[in-house]
Image: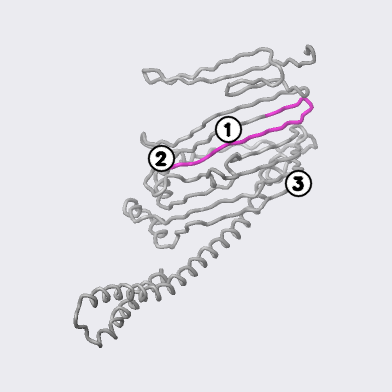
Amino acid sequence: ASASGAQVHLSKTVQMRHEERQDGVHHFRLHQSSGPVLDEPHSSGVGSAYRSPCGKGWRMRVNVPILSVGWVHRHCEVLAARARGVDLRVTLEDAGDAETQFSIQHFQVDHFTEGELPVVLNRRFLHINSRWLGKKAFNMKMKWVGHSHVVRSLQVEVVPYWVNLEIGVLIRLWDLAESSFSALSRRVASRRVALGPPSRPSSEGRCTSKDGGQVWRLMSLAIKDLRLTVMLRSPDASVVREHDNLTARWILRLPTDMPNMDVELPMIEIKEQFGSAAEFGEILKRRYIRNAKISALRSIVLSYLATIIKGMLSALWWLFRGPFDALTVASENFSSRATGAKNVSRFRMLTWWVPPLIQGSAEGTYRAMADLLG
């Protein structure tokens, strides 16, 4: 309908409200409202669905301000994933064209077990003047046609993240998972199923790929550069003492400490490809694994090379710093003593620097070898 050039559309809004009463019971209520709204509705609800103003179709939007999912073990929270600003928009046109937009403003994972840092996954560059601060942590936009199995465009963008991998924390979480979900991993006894008669193949139906999935046409895929900083820490001895874990004992003997290992994955673009979702995932997996290995190896080599160079420079500096500090202190002490003393032998005046030079050289050599070997 139209009146005075303005379009009137029917909007439906659904709101979910939560309330905890004194008896400890949680109550969830759904409120629905409908009415004529000009253009796109502006509501404070969690979700809304309405007719598209551009043509015949539907639009749906779901907005979640804060979403938190936790893992509770024996009434104690051990792991939590928190997302802020979750936004989902879906547009379905009667002609078959569809568009999906999904974004998350902030996402992080925290643990509550014994460890040095409580954060497992968090975005980087959160300082005040950061150019990444205003961007969304995850943003995906896809245009597709469902009935013809065509994806016109798919764009994915992720801000830089860093991962804190404390081996001790991972071992503790693994032990808790084995004790918590061991009953879910039990296999069910297989039963015999009678085979039906073979059916004659026909040309009707949808085209399937080798893995049995439906074939899609991917016209354009663009995943922007991904940057991940990994902080790897070796497990502490308490993990080995508390748990009879052979893997922890084996990892404890390895030099797994890595302060900052940058894994940079370049932008991936795919044009005009046919296949199922599993096949597209396998293509991305091969490319990312190859690029991740090259980037991680380069980061490890540069990190250890920089550490070795730093150790050598520090060792050379200690060879000069040890004697210099010892001579400086001995000179100040000798000057103060010589001023108050009346008779100072000429031999002592000429050889006062020999003992501190020997002691300083010994101390500097020890420090230099410690830095170099360390």
Q: Nearer the viewer, residue 253 or 182?
A: 253
Mark 1 falls on what kind of element?
A: strand
Mark 3 falls on what kind of element?
A: strand
Work out whether mark 1 precedes mark 2 in sequence or the reverse, and give the earlier one. Answer: 2
The region drawn magenta spans 90-111
Mark 1 nearby-residue class (10 Å; few <14, some 14–19, many ≥20): some
Q: Residue at x 32, y 51 (%)?
A: 242
Q: Residue at x 58, y 36 (%)?
A: 104
Q: CA distance from mark 1 to mark 2?
A: 23 Å
Magenta span: predominant SS is strand
Q: Which residue is mark 3?
A: 273
Mark 2 nearby-residue class (10 Å; few <14, some 14–19, many ≥20): some
Work out whether mark 3 precedes mark 2 in sequence or the reverse, and give the earlier one. Answer: 2
Q: Which residue is mark 2?
A: 78
Mark 2 falls on what kind of element?
A: strand
Q: Nearer the viewer, residue 87 or 351?
A: 351
Q: Is residue 67 above or below residue 297?
A: above
Q: Nearer the viewer, residue 342 or 297?
A: 342
Q: Which residue is mark 1?
A: 86
Residue type indicated by callout 2: Val
Q: Residue at x 38, y 48 (%)?
A: 115
Residue 182's x, y, as percent?
Answer: 42, 41
Q: Residue at x 56, y 38 (%)?
A: 192
User: Does the magenta segment cover residue 95?
Assistant: yes
Residue 43's x, y, as percent?
Answer: 61, 20
Residue type indicated by callout 1: Val
Residue 237's x, y, as percent?
Answer: 34, 56
Residue 343 occupies quadrant? bottom left
